[in-house]
Image (cartoon, rainbow, N blue to C red):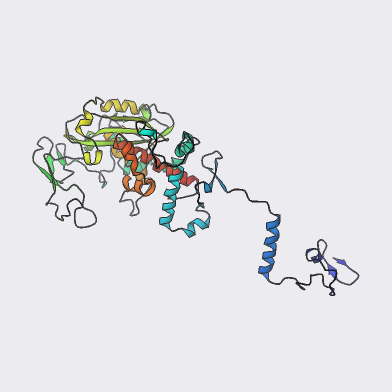
């Protein structure tokens, strides 16, 4: 403390007179101006003055940017690129101002602007689709994002979503037999989404529900083309009785699995030559005399480009091509000579120890292809059903909620191609939004 001649004590350093200068024409001996006459007692007024001084002296703020930390490399992009601003979930403004339906709507809208691209068909006039988002010349919005996304970065991001060994067994993925090579085992035969054959010669009809003999499959099959939903009437004919059917067929068909006859499987972990990467797989099945067999398969890379696509001749005579779901007809197989073994050899060139396989309920596809793979990401698990684990969301429902591009089906040769591309888009959506702080 330093004492002055007038007897007033003060603290070393800047005094109040430096902040509130004294006017020369004032009659008062106070060190404050005439307009105030006293120090501001109101905390709000003092805070406003402090903020005004801060705004005059602070640096101008730069444009808001984000960084993809989980990708391992600094990729900056402005958040307001598409004309509206998204706040991360960690920032309370986005979470508190938007209800959950609006969050999903904005997430899907953001995906359409940043990632979604149409499936370009070279045979289509103009090689473009008018509803495609604006992108740099010669490069789509999805390509511009994926050019910076290396396979190793994508694999590191989707690694937490890989199914564990316990999940693979619980979901009835084909697992290798411990003693016999080339044989697969199913560990959860009581799962509700799998149908087991009653015996080696008997099957459950997947349409009418009756039990028939595979060597004496004669007699009409009467059924409803649509399943009974939450209501009491069938959507196909608005009838309530399961016996008052609206459709009929000459033979019964079955999708039962004989767990004692799972032979001829190839293990990608041991025989695969595939390198590090992420691929999406989807297959279409038809009904034969021995059950369901694969008839078409598509493999898509992380850029949503088709790397392998083919039709397959079933090993047994076809009873029904399941056209309503597979979009396959008898005329499609006139010049097809590809067999299941040829497809297995070709897929082993892409799948291996370091390959992550993406699919929607892909255990059905692996069973029909007679393949065993360990590193799997299933979109039916990544996007869980609100009702719990006992229900699974359909790929069509996920597509309508998050992607909303119905026009893609018109430009694909096979339905499995469209499904494989949409499955990869769902994973890219999950990766893109999670890297930027959004959770769906």
Q: Residue at x 43, y 49 (%)?
A: 109
- Residue 93 percent coordinates (x, y): 52, 57
Task: State how many labels appear.
Answer: 0
* Residue found at the very far right of the displayed protein: 5
Question: Is residue 308 something one can see in this rendering?
Answer: yes
Query: Would residue 339 appear left or right of 78 to someone viewing this image?
Result: left
Position above or below: 190 against 7: above
Q: Quadrant of residue 164?
A: top left
* Residue found at the very far bottom of the displayed protein: 27
* Residue found at the very far front of the displayed protein: 126
- Residue 309 percent coordinates (x, y): 32, 30
Query: Would residue 361 appear left or right of 84 to someone viewing this image?
Result: left
Position above or below: 87 against 287: below
Q: Residue at x 33, y 54 (%)?
A: 387
Q: Residue at x 91, y 70 (%)?
A: 5
- Residue 191 percent coordinates (x, y): 27, 46
- Residue 384 percent coordinates (x, y): 36, 49
Screen quadrant of the N terminus: bottom right
Question: Is residue 362 something one can see in this rendering?
Answer: no
Q: Quadrant of residue 41?
A: bottom right
Query: Would residue 6 appear left or right of 425 to someone viewing this image?
Result: right
Q: Quadrant of residue 357?
A: top left
- Give whichever of 273, 327 is nearer the camera: 327
């Amino acid at each position: 403390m330093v004492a002055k001649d007038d007897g007033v004590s003060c603290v070393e350093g800047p005094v109040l007179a430096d902040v509130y200068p004294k006017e020369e024409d004032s009659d008062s001996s106070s060190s404050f101006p005439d307009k105030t006459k006293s120090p501001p007692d109101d905390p709000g007024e003092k805070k406003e003055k402090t903020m005004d001084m801060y705004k005059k002296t602070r640096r101008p703020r730069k444009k808001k940017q984000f960084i993809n930390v989980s990708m391992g490399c600094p990729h900056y992009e402005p958040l307001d690129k598409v004309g509206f601003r998204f706040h991360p979930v960690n920032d309370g403004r986005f979470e508190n101002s938007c209800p959950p339906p609006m969050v999903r709507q904005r997430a899907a809208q953001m995906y359409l602007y940043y990632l979604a691209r149409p499936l370009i068909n070279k045979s289509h006039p103009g090689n473009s689709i008018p509803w495609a988002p604006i992108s740099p010349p010669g490069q789509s919005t999805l390509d511009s994002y994926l050019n910076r996304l290396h396979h190793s970065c994508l694999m590191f991001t989707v690694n937490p979503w890989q199914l564990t060994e316990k999940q693979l067994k619980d979901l009835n993925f084909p697992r290798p037999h411990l003693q016999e090579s080339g044989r697969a085992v199913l560990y959860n035969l009581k799962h509700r989404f799998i149908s087991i054959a009653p015996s080696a010669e008997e099957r459950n009809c997947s349409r009418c529900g009756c039990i028939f003999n595979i060597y004496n499959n004669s007699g009409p099959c009467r059924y409803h083309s649509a399943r009974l939903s939450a209501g009491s009437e069938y959507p196909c004919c608005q009838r309530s009785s399961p016996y008052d059917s609206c459709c009929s067929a000459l033979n019964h068909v079955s999708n039962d699995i004989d767990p004692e006859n799972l032979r001829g499987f190839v293990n990608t972990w041991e025989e695969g030559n595939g390198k590090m990467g992420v691929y999406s797989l989807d297959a279409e099945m038809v009904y034969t005399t021995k059950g369901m067999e694969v008839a078409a398969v598509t493999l898509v890379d992380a850029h949503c480009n088709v790397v392998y696509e083919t039709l397959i001749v079933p090993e047994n005579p076809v009873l029904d091509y399941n056209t309503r779901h597979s979009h396959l007809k008898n005329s499609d197989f006139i010049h097809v000579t590809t067999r299941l073994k040829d497809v297995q050899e070709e897929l082993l060139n892409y799948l291996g120890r370091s390959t992550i396989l993406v699919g929607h309920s892909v255990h059905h596809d692996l069973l029909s292809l007679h393949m065993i793979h360990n590193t799997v990401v299933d979109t039916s698990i990544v996007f869980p059903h609100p009702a719990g684990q006992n229900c699974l969301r359909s790929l069509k429902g996920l597509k309508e909620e998050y992607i909303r591009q119905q026009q893609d089906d018109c430009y694909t040769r096979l339905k499995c191609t469209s499904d494989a591309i949409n499955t990869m888009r769902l994973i890219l959506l999950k990766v893109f939004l999670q890297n930027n702080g959004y959770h769906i």
